Amino acid sequence: MGFRAGFEITSGEKTGKRAEYSLYCGAMKVLVTGGAGYIGSVTVEMLLDRGHEVTIFDNFERGHHSAVDARARLIEGDLRNQAAIESAMQQARPEAVMHFAAYALVGESMAHPEMYFANNVKGGINLAEAMLKNGVKKTVFSSSCATYGQPETMPITETTPQHPTNPYGESKLMFEKVLDWFGRIHGFQNVFLRYFNAAGASAKFGEDHDPETHLIPNIMDVALGQKPALQIYGDDYGTPDGTCIRDYIHIEDLAQAHILALTGRQTGAFNLGTGRGCSVREILKAANEITAKKIPAQILPRRPGDPARLVADASKASSILGWRPTRSTVEDIISSAWAWHKKHPQGYGD
């Protein structure tokens, strides 16, 4: 994905060629918004392990100070504050931006859509404007399968029509469109990574949300005795065991995709998933075995709008980015989550 062997930059070439060489061949200076969050923290860890220079920009509204890798530079600030992100951009002087910072709760977005458009869209526009003013044009955007809504066919490809069914998905799609126009008009090089269910943990960093709405950390809480039972919303779907099927990706595989998107020349949208999908009952069965705990479950009515099955077609990411998930088996995902939650039974505690 780099230049040919023996490539040399001579003193007479333009500075743009130097920037291009740095962008695709060596260590980069990267600004990571939301780098104290779940996906951001593991991606920062992996970027640093590979020799990149990382500045985290986070307001800690939903991130954690304990999730900040000590090797990274930290600038505390809020994307909704234009002056704050412009100052951070000037201090960090990055060659590229990885953008994770966003609200990401579907139910909350239905109750408070104004929050989601102010933070996810207006905050994103502030980021794009700060990038433009400082000559930063490479973006890896943490988007979502929520932009597709409830597709009629599976698996979901990048050409599946995008019809979000909630303000969260709409806000992600709106910012994709903002970046697309910045690309057409200002030359931004954008990658949109639309992923499905991030899960698992690295050795250092794991999943800690408040409230916690994701299946696997909720199972871990029951296994640790912090909740009485797992709540399963519906067991009468048209799936083999009646429970919803989702496409789970190990957080380290997800982080690897972001780095491939950062260091490659490709642009556009890429789905990230395994293409397999697991039901709620399959995840619960594996968790019972791995934790050696009897995890009780309570069947509740379906939640409105929950599709029976959401599975990605990630063949484009495989063929163009060269992405190959290696840790996204149910066993690897749950084992890593269990190891982290046993060490951090109260989460990060901050």
Image (cartoon, rainbow, N blue to C red):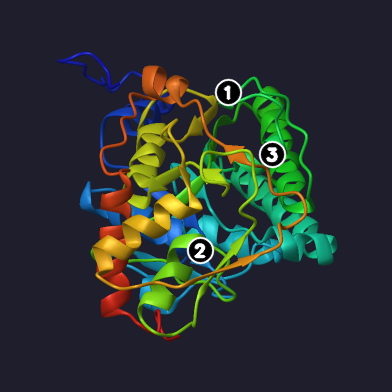
Residue denoted by label 2: 57
The residue sitting at 75% across, 59% down in the picture is 116
Residue denoted by label 1: 157
Residue denoted by label 3: 147
The residue type indicated by label 2 comes to: Phe
Going by the image, does 5 lie left or right of 75? left
Tell me if I can see residue 200 in this picture: no
Q: Are marks 2 and 1 in contact (CB under 8 Å)?
A: no
Q: CA distance from mark 2 to mark 1?
A: 32 Å
The disc, 1 or 3, on the residue closer to the chain's N-terminal end is 3
The residue sitting at 70% across, 55% down in the picture is 120
**Pointer 3: residues within 10 angstroms few (<14), some, or many (20+)?**
many
Q: Is residue 104 above or below residue 230?
A: above
Query: Where's residue 258, x and y in %?
Result: 41, 40
Please state which of residues 71 and 185 is positioned toward the viewer in this rendering: 71
Task: Report the quarter where the N terminus lies.
Answer: top left
Q: CA distance from mark 2 to mark 3?
A: 25 Å
Q: Secondary structure at mark 2?
A: strand
Please state which of residues 184 and 225 is positioned toward the viewer in this rendering: 225
Q: Secondary structure at mark 1?
A: loop
Q: Are marks 1 and 3 in contact (CB under 8 Å)?
A: no
Q: Is residue 153 above or below residue 62?
A: above
Q: Nearer the viewer, mark 2 or mark 1?
A: 1
